[in-house]
């Protein structure tokens, strides 16, 4: 279930974050944080 959500949404979340922060590295970190918080929840 979690992996399916990651596969379905990771790219869109990354793109959204990238266009807000204009940094690939920061967008990748933030995307990872989103899914870590989801996993813990």
Image (cartoon, rainbow, N blue to C red):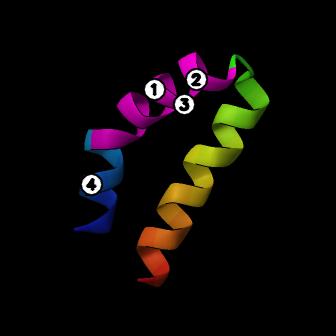
Dominant secondary structure of the residues highlighted in magenta in the image: helix
Pick the front one: 18 or 9? 18
Please give the residue where the numbered disc 2 appears in the rendered image.
20
Q: How far is disc 1 from disc 2 in space, using C-alphas?
A: 7 Å
- Identify the disc placed on residue 16: 1
The answer to the question of whether label 4 and label 1 lie on touching residues, with beta carbons closer than 8 A, is: no
Q: How far is disc 4 from disc 3 in space, using C-alphas?
A: 17 Å
Residue 5 picture quarter: bottom left
The answer to the question of whether label 3 and label 1 lie on touching residues, with beta carbons closer than 8 A, is: yes
Q: Quadrant of the C terminus?
A: bottom left
The answer to the question of whether label 4 and label 2 lie on touching residues, with beta carbons closer than 8 A, is: no
Please give the residue where the numbered disc 3 appears in the rendered image.
17
**Residue 19: horizontal and vertical position, in percent?**
55, 16
Q: Residue placed at 33% from the left, 59% from the top?
A: 3
Q: Secondary structure at mark 3?
A: helix
Residue 17 picture quarter: top right
**Residue 39: horizontal and vertical position, in percent?**
44, 75
The answer to the question of whether label 4 and label 3 lie on touching residues, with beta carbons closer than 8 A, is: no
Q: Is residue 29 left or right of residue 17?
A: right
- The question of residue 34 being in magenta is answered with no
Q: Quadrant of the N terminus?
A: bottom left
Please give the residue where the numbered disc 4 appears in the rendered image.
5
Q: Is residue 17 left or right of residue 41?
A: right
């Amino acid at each position: 279930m979690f992996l399916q959500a990651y596969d379905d949404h990771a790219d869109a979340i990354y793109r959204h974050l990238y266009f807000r922060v204009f940094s690939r590295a920061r967008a990748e970190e933030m995307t990872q944080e989103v899914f870590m918080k989801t996993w813990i929840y």
